[in-house]
């Protein structure tokens, strides 16, 4: 029988990697699930609910993970938790693989296999495992709700005997899963919505949601998408033309939601200080990329910055501020991936290292980093890079390998789902 352990998350993370619903399904698939007492409380899942679903309740993180073959987390756990795991066990979670690579290397040296769910290949059979999409969808919704809460004006147009209340103007920058949900939410609230992205494929999706697409649509724009569906790095000439167009558009916007990210790189700067200063007092910016440096020049992680009357919200972990929904979706993502690692006949753990889902997400095995991109960041040419090439089946970084395309519900923005 496969043992699955779930420790508590850190104080700043309210989500959890399993819910009573997914515990039932994992037990049915042949697993024994142990969860740290109180680990689900911030997502409003109680110990009795987990116990009723078939989970064992442990008194400590070490007890929860000590005998586990698989440990499920939301964020990268403390090293003490990983050290408490068995050598050769698997840690699966959103491990933030391109940040603190030295810390990641230290975890790899414990002998635990590390799987980063953010690197899940974007192919049809992996849609149910796509944590970036499930969490970004909620973040896009919450960004609009938070903006509306501090805007201090109504979003929809209202016709009254005393006069007309004009509709608010909302501009979404980056049209991936988060951006599409932000557009849909703002439209449902009655705002006039525009959106921009460097990928031509999203123009039709923007229009289908009732928003207007804003971009310099030249020849470079028509070629601005990679085979994997991500935004390409644009030329300086294009960036200048686009910036001029956006700068003029920004002046008349009431709320701006920025979502643009490129995997493994700092967030691109989309809103300069001058653009922000051109906005009317009382306007609101929500920067969903603030954890990676931000799309807005004045954004600060975890802070609300006010500049010339414009408020810039740099809230962290917006999906986590809806912990019940976020945990439910994330837990289903993990459950689907774990079930793909289980032999349906014997109900034993059977990780197929040739499977593209495993190749894409595996970043450490047998005490070494096996993802080429991460190994190169660590400056480990020789053995680490060779191991990475072997594990991935080629010399390409698992994070940037171009998988077969799928047709998701929402397209990918410049790195942000």
Image: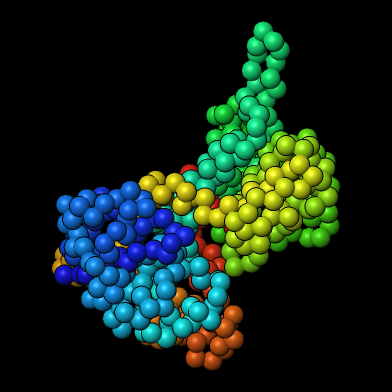
Judge left or right: residue 376 versus residue 354. right
Hey, which residue is sitting farthest top in the picture? 161
Whether 256 is drawn above or below 66: the answer is above
Work out whether residue 29 can be spotted: no
Q: Residue at x 44, y 59 (%)?
A: 13
Residue 188: x %, y % from top left: 55, 29
Q: How is the image coloured?
A: rainbow
- Where, by quadrant of the figure, is residue 112 drawn? bottom left
In the picture, which quadrant includes the N terminus? bottom left
Q: Residue at x 78, y 60 (%)?
A: 235
Residue 180: x %, y % from top left: 56, 42
Viewer-side residue, 26 vs 388: 26
Q: Residue at x 36, y 72 (%)?
A: 91
Q: Residue at x 43, y 62 (%)?
A: 11
Work out whether residue 309 can be spotted: yes
Residue 81: x %, y % from top left: 36, 75
């Amino acid at each position: 029988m496969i043992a699955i352990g779930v420790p508590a998350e850190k104080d700043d993370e309210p989500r959890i990697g399993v819910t009573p619903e997914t515990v039932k399904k994992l037990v049915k698939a042949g697993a024994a699930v142990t969860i740290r007492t109180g680990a689900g409380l911030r997502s409003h899942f109680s110990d009795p609910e987990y116990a009723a679903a078939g989970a064992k309740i442990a008194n400590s993180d070490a007890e929860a993970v000590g005998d586990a073959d698989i440990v499920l987390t939301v964020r990268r756990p403390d090293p003490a938790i990983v050290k408490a795991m068995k050598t050769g066990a698997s840690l699966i979670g959103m491990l933030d693989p391109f940040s603190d690579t030295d810390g990641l290397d230290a975890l790899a040296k414990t002998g635990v296999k590390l799987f980063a769910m953010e690197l899940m290949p974007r192919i049809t059979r992996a849609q149910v495992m796509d944590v970036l999409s499930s969490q970004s969808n909620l973040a896009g919704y919450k960004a609009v709700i938070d903006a509306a809460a501090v805007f201090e004006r109504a979003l929809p147009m209202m016709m009254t005997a005393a006069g007309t209340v004009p509709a608010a103007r909302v501009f979404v920058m980056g049209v991936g899963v988060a951006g599409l949900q932000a557009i849909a939410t703002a439209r449902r609230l009655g705002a006039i919505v525009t959106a921009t992205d460097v990928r031509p494929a999203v123009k039709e999706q923007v229009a289908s949601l009732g928003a207007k697409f804003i971009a310099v649509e030249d020849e470079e724009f028509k070629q601005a998408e990679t085979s994997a569906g991500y935004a390409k790095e644009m030329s300086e000439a294009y960036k200048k033309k686009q910036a001029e167009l956006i700068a003029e558009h920004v002046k008349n916007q009431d709320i701006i939601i920025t979502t643009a990210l490129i995997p493994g790189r700092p967030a691109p700067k989309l809103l300069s200080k001058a653009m922000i200063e051109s906005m009317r007092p009382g306007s609101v910016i929500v920067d969903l990329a603030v954890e990676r440096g931000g799309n807005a020049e004045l954004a600060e992680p975890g802070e609300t910055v006010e500049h010339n009357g414009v408020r810039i919200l740099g809230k962290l972990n917006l999906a986590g501020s809806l912990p019940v929904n976020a945990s439910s979706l994330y837990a289903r993502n993990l459950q689907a991936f774990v079930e793909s690692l289980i032999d349906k006949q014997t109900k034993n753990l059977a990780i197929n290292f040739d499977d593209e889902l495993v190749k894409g997400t595996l970043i450490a095995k047998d005490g070494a980093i096996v993802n080429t991109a991460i190994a190169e960041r660590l400056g480990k040419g020789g053995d680490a890079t060779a191991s990475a090439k072997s594990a991935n089946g080629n010399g390409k970084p698992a994070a940037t390998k171009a998988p077969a395309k799928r047709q998701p519900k929402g397209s990918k923005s410049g790195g942000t789902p």
